[in-house]
Image (cartoon, rainbow, N blue to C red):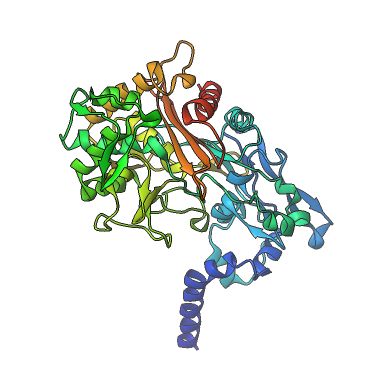
Amino acid sequence: MAILFALLVAFTSRWTVFEAESLVDNTNNRRPLLEEQRVPRGKIFANDGRTVLATNRGRGQGDDRTFTRVYPPGGLFSHAVGYSFLLNGRVALERSMNDDLTGEENEFASILSGIEDRTREGFDVVTNLDPEGQQAAVAGLGGRKGAVVAIEPQTGKVRAMVSIPEYDANRIPDDFEALNRDPNKPTLNRTTQEAYPPGSTFKVVTATAALDTGKVTPESIIDGSSPRTVSGVPLANSGGTDFGPITLTTALTNSVNTVFAQIGEDVGRDTLVEYMDRFGFNEDPKLDYPESQMIASGIRDASGGLVGGDGGFDVGRVAIGQGGAEGEIRATPLQMAQVAGTIANDGRLMKPRLTDKVLRKDGRVKERAEPDLQAQVMKESTAKALTEMMGRVVDEGTGTAAALSGIRVAGKSGTAEVGANREFTQPWFIAFAPIDAPRIAVAVTLERTTGQGGTVAAPIARQVMEALL
């Protein structure tokens, strides 16, 4: 009998450890969600610990009492917080933090006991999300499709995560099918689930590779003539401007395509991909968020697959944030916010975090997320040089619309041409501030619109930084 019991325990252990998660995550398996309706989920708070982002509404009495999720801010935090409903499953933080939100400290012991704990309550989760930062991002986008991510460079804390169109999580039970059919894809988190051509914002990655390997210095003189032949095809600067011989700093200030295409060719495919890898490209983000709702940034071929250093891509055009038939660079807004944050943090890439801490019902901290270094991407001296170069972009170059009164800002604009006939633009702006002691880094992009990154996206970045500084 003891042996049979041991075998049963072993089998149950295997089932619990290896199978339970897949069953819970399968939205067709409603039993876990049905059981969890009887448990009051923990609340989700903004970074102030007071603004409630998710709570519960109770119904019934005694053994029949159940709880339904309520989202007081409506759509303001919808893509970061997500939703949890019996018939619709869970997404975003409601999914990635589910064990804490349902109070499952020891699921194995609970299953073995076979006794339902009717007194179980979920733990509360305090996020790093700032209500003012969220509101500034939403206001800046003004209903236009796009995304904004803001992070603390030294800690990786995600202070703002906004994707437009948004959706009201409270309406999910009624509008679920309609939302999923909507061609505007309101439930898609454009900060983590959509990768766009980053345009000239990617030039800071190219500059990192060149500076860090000693190929160039900020004062190196490089030919900025236009047009120039790159991979057998003419490449021109914006507006066809011929800059002639200029420094690397001037080239970044004015976003000179021909200079950075040449640098890309000089650095080479392998080295450029190596530095992309260091920044976190070519792998899923290290964010506390469901893996199914994140994609990797990188060079993608026509089939959507990631291309490595031996992929034969047009390194000159990838170096300026574009690409060719063999592969085009694509980046999520989260990835580009991390690029800016890494430069701001002396070359250190921190793992991004949406959650700050988990609280027990008596207010004691159950778990706190500490800053976690993901990679030392570049030398500190390289980051300092890039910071000054990006400061020039905002002081006198293509990013003046991101300037803050009394606070010096570092930034880089980008404008990619998109559409079947290149009839639309994908404007970008990445930035961090204050330049001498950075506290916030931001990435902004707008989807299939018109206008330049320096005129369309930069003002939004300024609004978000103003709100968070």
Query: How many labels were placed on the picture?
Result: 0
Residue at the (76%, 50%) spot, across then down? 171
The quarter holding residue 432 reads top left
Residue 348: % across, % down: 31, 36
Question: As displayed, is residue 254 above or below residue 188?
Answer: above
Residue extending furthest toward the top: 406
The quarter holding residue 301 reads bottom left
Q: Is residue 398 left or right of residue 231?
A: right
Q: Is residue 274 visible?
A: yes
Camera-side residue: 161 or 454? 454
Residue 194: % across, % down: 51, 49
Question: As displayed, is residue 302 above or below residue 460?
Answer: below
Q: Is residue 429 left or right of residue 313?
A: right
Question: As displayed, is residue 13 above or below residue 238?
Answer: below
Residue 35: % across, % down: 69, 64
Q: Is residue 183 left or right of residue 253?
A: right
Residue 427: % across, % down: 49, 35
Residue at the (55%, 42%) spot, across then down? 448
Camera-side residue: 251 or 361? 251
The quarter holding residue 124 reads top right
Question: As displayed, is residue 12 above or below residue 123?
Answer: below
Residue extending furthest toward the left: 214
Camera-side residue: 40 or 138? 138
Q: Is residue 56 left or right of residue 237?
A: right
Q: Is residue 356 visible?
A: no
Residue at the (28%, 34%) spot, across then down? 258
